[in-house]
Image (cartoon, helix red, strand yellow):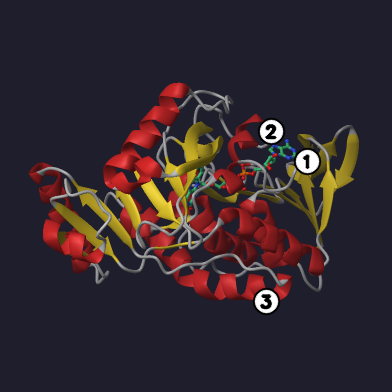
Amino acid sequence: MKIVIIGGGVMGTAIAHELAGPGFEVVILERAIPGAEASTAAAGMLAPQLEAQAPGPMLELSMRSRGLYPAWARSLSAESGLDVAYLESGALQLAYTEAQAHDLDALVAWQQAMGLRATLLAGPEVCALEPNVSPEVVAAAHFPDDHQVDPKKLMKALSAAVARKGVSFRTGYARRLLEENGSVTGVDLDGESLHADLTIVAAGSWSSLLPGAAIDPKHLKPARGQMIELALRLPPVKHLLKSGLGYVVPRSDGHVICGTTVELAGYDKRVTAEGLATVLAQAMRACPMLKDATVIDSWAGLRPWTEDSLPLLGVGHLKNLVIASGHHRNGILLAPITAKLVGQLVRGERTSVDLTPFRPGRFSSFGG
Ligand SMILES: Cc1cc2nc3c(=O)[nH]c(=O)nc-3n(C[C@H](O)[C@H](O)[C@H](O)COP(=O)(O)OP(=O)(O)OC[C@H]3O[C@@H](n4cnc5c(N)ncnc54)[C@H](O)[C@@H]3O)c2cc1C
């Protein structure tokens, strides 16, 4: 079976990794450099508990994926010979006011009721755990099972692992899906008709621009996130720190990734003065020691945002079409479960997660 995947980000490559093997010829179509868009702009937090607003299908999907990560990271490292910097960091969500502490108390309570490990720490306990966190912090929710990976290293390992498994990459722009009698038969790649028995759309924020995929740009659009990388001699903290949209992700070498903004600003990847000021202010408030850090880099990436914050995952509106997009803020985290579920769909097995809430057609008339 020939499978063509449009998009060489973490989704397309993780799916290729899952499918490559006897019986499947897998080709990834990438218009530029594989992994160079959202997938390497990401911070790499694997943090469903830190991200969760409420119980629901997104939390369930995210928890499943987090559970797959340690083994997935180990196997990618073994297959590629490259480290992916998977770190069992744990995470702290910070409260600077009593009102925020009250909200964290409720968050911890419902997560504990679900059997998840979560604790509310008072200010002095936060200080004992992380002495370089701001003295302004009055409380924090502690999620020891939220971890991190380095997305740049992950993408290198994933690309090497799929190449070893015989997946081929074609550089080119997928102009549209080819269709015959209600089935997708392949892709127009820069004017060449490329036949496929199955086509998978994993084109991130650009998925809704692909003619034939029937994804409305109103429902899937780019959400810019701006980031700054700082460096100190030693990591200032061990845990991922978050407050509101601001976060600090300490790598083991003393580099610190600071995020972020969420801006529906079209396909504009500029880093702006206001964006940088916001990100830096949030990071320095959480960890004042960062005021003295060296600025290493800044960048912006485009997250595939969806209207209801759930990915588009499942069969498309035509036969032989699968959509795996719209993972917004959590695509690094969700890569292994997405790949596993697409593998189950392609092999005709029952999926281990109910895909109904993620139906790609849920916003449109075809409903599939
Ligand atoms: C600033 C920022 C911080 C983030 N932090 C985290 C985090 O901490 N944890 C987490 O889990 N997630 C995080 N994310 C989200 C995560 O990065 C994304 O959800 C994920 O990378 C999406 O992967 P993707 O493969 O769908 O998209 P992308 O990585 O954008 O890949 C899509 C690929 O498709 C290609 N393409 C598009 N159209 C075509 C076409 N027509 N023909 C050929 N190729 C095409 C593009 O060139 C691109 O390479 C963050 C994202 C950003 C931007």
Q: CB at mark 2 closer than 8 A to ligand 1?
A: yes
Observer able to see residue 245: no
The residue at which mark 3 appears reads as 78
Which residue type does callout 2 highlight? Answer: Leu
Residue appearing at x 65%, y 70% in the figure: 76
**Is 180 or 171 nearer to us in this picture?**
171
Q: Which residue sits at x=73%, y=67%?
A: 161
Q: List the residue tagged with mark 2.
A: 210
Give percent across and percent down for residue 150: 55, 58
Which of pointers 3 and 1 indicates the residue nearer the eye?
3
Q: Residue at x 91, y 37 (%)?
A: 192
Seen in the picture, residue 71 relative to 256 is either above or below; the reply is: below
Residue 134: percent from left, percent from top: 23, 48
Q: Give the residue pinned by disc 1.
A: 181
Asked where in the image residue 112 lies, by quadrant, the reply is bottom left
Tag in front: 3 or 2: 3
Sequence-wise first label, 3 or 2? 3
